[in-house]
Image: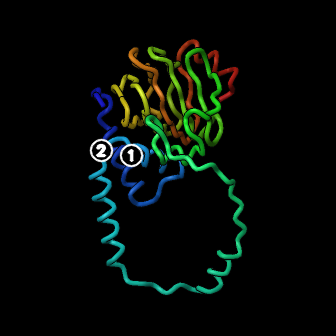
Amino acid sequence: MTSHPLAMPHGHALDALLAGYACGLLSAPLHTLVASHLAISPKNRAFVSNLETANGSALAELSPAPVRDREARLNAIFEQDVDEPIRRRVTGDALVPAPLARYLGMDLGAVPWRTLMPGVKEFRAEGSMKAGATLYWIRAGRRMPAHTHEGSEYTLVLQGAFSDVAGRYERGDIAIGDDELDHCPTADASADCLCFAVTDAPLRLTGPIGRIVQRFIGT
C-alpha cells in the first residue's frame, strides 16, 4: 500500500485486526477477510505466526481448571441439532483465495452479481445494507460515490487497485475506514477492481449526488 499522511493510524488498526485474528476473536466475515489476506499476501504472515506462537505459549502456562457439570455440558452439546446447508466443495481460483471461496460457498464464476450503479456490481454474502460482508466489482477507472462510515469498514483487494485520500491499495492490501474518513475510492484505470468488504455499521453518502441517493436507499 502507498500511504498518505492521513493514513498513519491505519497501521495500528491493521495490527489490532491481525491480533484479533490470531486470538480467534473475529467474526466469521472478518476472520475470512484476514485469512484471505494471508493466503494471497506474505506481508503479515510472520507477524501473525509470531502472535499465534505467543498465544499458544501463554495457554500452555495456564493451570488446568475443573469444568463444572462437565457431563451435563457435554450432553447438551451432543444433543444439539445441527442444521447446516450442504455446500458444494470449492477451492478458490486465481483471484478468490480458498478461505473466501469457502465462506461464499461458490467460486467467482458462480457469484450472482447485482448492479449497484453503472460500472459497479455487488454480492452481499451476509447482512444487509447497514452492515455485513459484500463482494464488489468496480469497473476500471470508476469513481465510487463519496462516503463516510458510522462504524468500521475493512476492505481486501482481490484484483486491481483503488485509491482514496488515505492511499493506494492493491491486491492483498487491507484498507480500513472509520467514521473519521470521508473518501471517494477510485479504481485504477489499468484493471477492474475486485474487493471483499466487511462492515459493522452503515455507510453514509456525503457528496451532492450521494445525499440525493441516500434519500432513496434509506440508510
**Label 1 packing within 10 angstroms: few (<14), some (14-19), many (20+):** some
**Whole-percent x, y for residue 170 in the image:** 36, 29
The part of the image, by quadrant, that contains residue 1 is top left
- Which residue is found at the position 36% from the left and 36% from the top? 173
**Whole-percent x, y for residue 201 in the image:** 57, 39
For badge 2, the amino acid type reads Pro
Quickly name the residue at label 2: 42
Instruction: Classify residue 172 as left or right of residue 102.
Output: left
Quickly name the residue at label 1: 39
Asked if the residues shown at circle 1 and circle 2 are in contact, with their CB atoms under 8 angstroms apart, the answer is no
Residue 161 in sight: yes
**Whole-percent x, y for residue 94 in the image:** 43, 36
Estimate the spatial distance between the alpha carbons at disc 1 and disc 2, rounded to whole Å.
8 Å
- In the rendered view, tell whether residue 190 sits above or below residue 23: above
**What element does badge 2 sit on?**
loop
**What element does badge 1 sit on?**
helix
**Label 2 packing within 10 angstroms: few (<14), some (14-19), many (20+):** few
The part of the image, by quadrant, that contains residue 164 is top left
Q: Nearer the viewer, residue 198 or 108?
A: 108
For badge 1, the amino acid type reads Ala
Q: How is the image coloured?
A: rainbow
Q: Nearer the viewer, residue 101 or 155?
A: 101
- In the rendered view, tell whether residue 174 sits above or below residue 183: below
Q: Nearer the viewer, residue 175 or 142?
A: 142
Quarter of the image with the C terminus in it: top right
